[in-house]
Amino acid sequence: MQVKGEGRWLQDTGFGLMFHYEAFSKHTPESYNRAIDSFDVKRFADEVAGTEAGHVIFVVGQHWGRYCAPNGAYEKRLGVGPGVWTSKRDLIMEIGRELNARDIKLILYLTARAPMRHYQVIKAMGDTLPTIDGKPAGPRVDPMSHPRKLKGFRRSENQAPNPAFLKSWGEVCGEWSKRYGPLVSGWWFDGYKLEMKEAYDSLRKEAHNIDTWIAAVRSGNPDAELAFNAGAHPILSLCTNGRLCPHQTFTAGENHDFYAKTKKGKGKPLTPKNFPAPEGVIWHLLLPVSAGWGAGTESRFELAILRKHLDTINAEGGTVTLDVPIASNGAMPVAILKLLRELGSEIEKLRDGAYSF
């Protein structure tokens, strides 16, 4: 029987870095393009390489609906040209090329659903609209509302997607996939909620479904690794109860510490042995190294703590991604970069056989 994950690159990266680039900033088209134009790609790639990280997860865009790469399919749906909801500069292409030159794998972060902060974007993409008691909530209701505050409210992502959206999202993802080809080695999809998982079988009866969307995602690189995320809980993020999506090849791994959270505080260490992934799915843990996703200036963890957990997880066949804050020009906080370089230096010495633990 084949060993789980045998021969797969992600299992051998040791650890990687994630960057929530401008994901939480409320930009105008002008300020967004200025931020992206300021990004020093070569320095960024050199700094990543200096940490010995084997992969990068880079956020193309999140719920604000802006993306740091042009996309004709998306722009057409929204009735605009490059530079409005997308950037004029293709930052992803430049990052992909520089990381590839340094033998660092690139994974793209996208949402599995249309950007939720803008009702008109959800509507333009054809996704299921937010509802109140099963009826369309309308554009005057904040699409990010919560049912605890607005009785009967359901966000778009908390309802099943429809074939029209999966067709349009397939066109958007497929355009990027074909453009970047093997420069993109994986995709990490956020917001793949249980409602989307439960709709998988019924959607297969439609001409456009989750299978056709994923076929478009992989059109540029059929071997791309895929993760789907439903939330920061080991059962969901580490798929201990099975894949969220049949196409899943590595766990999303979203958590906030190296230990499971319990009502009493700290539970078991998050490791492949304690929270095993399904057969054929590479075990992957993702957590912020600093104050939160894309936030902070210093590491929450000492070097020895990071080494301890990475060594254990790597030895059990898993990998880790540390989410790192990043400025609009691509710079990482000085203190965090220093720690990551020290981490990489120790790992490199171990690889070279200078010493062992």
Image: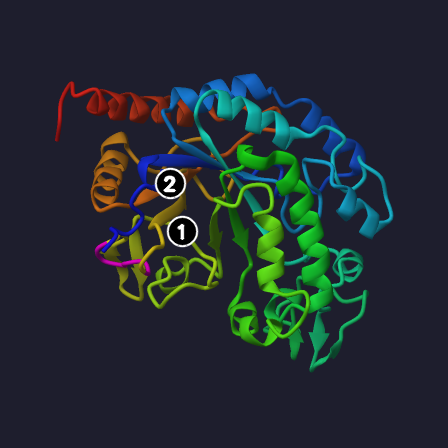
Q: Quadrant of residue 346?
A: top left
Please give the range of residues in magenta.
273-278
| Labels 2 and 1 touching (C-beta < 8 A) | yes
Amino acid carrying label 1: it is: Phe
Q: Predominant secondary structure in magenta?
A: loop
Q: Is residue 157 left or right of residue 46?
A: right
Amino acid carrying label 2: it is: Leu
Task: Tell me the residue at 81%/39% (across/down).
Answer: 84
**Label 2 secondary element:** helix
Q: Position of residue 135 (x, y in %)?
A: 75, 80
Q: Tell me if residue 159 comes above or below residue 7 in the rendering.
A: below
Q: Is residue 170 left or right of residue 101?
A: right
Neighbourhood count class around disc 1 (C-alpha, 10 Å): few under 14, some 14–19, many 20 upward: many
The residue under label 2 is: 10
Q: Tell me if residue 48 comes above or below residue 266 in the rendering.
A: above
The residue under label 1 is: 250
Q: Quadrant of residue 75?
A: top right
Q: Position of residue 316 (x, y in %)?
A: 21, 46
Kindly tell me whether residue 207 is visible in this rendering. yes
Q: Position of residue 8 (x, y in %)?
A: 35, 42
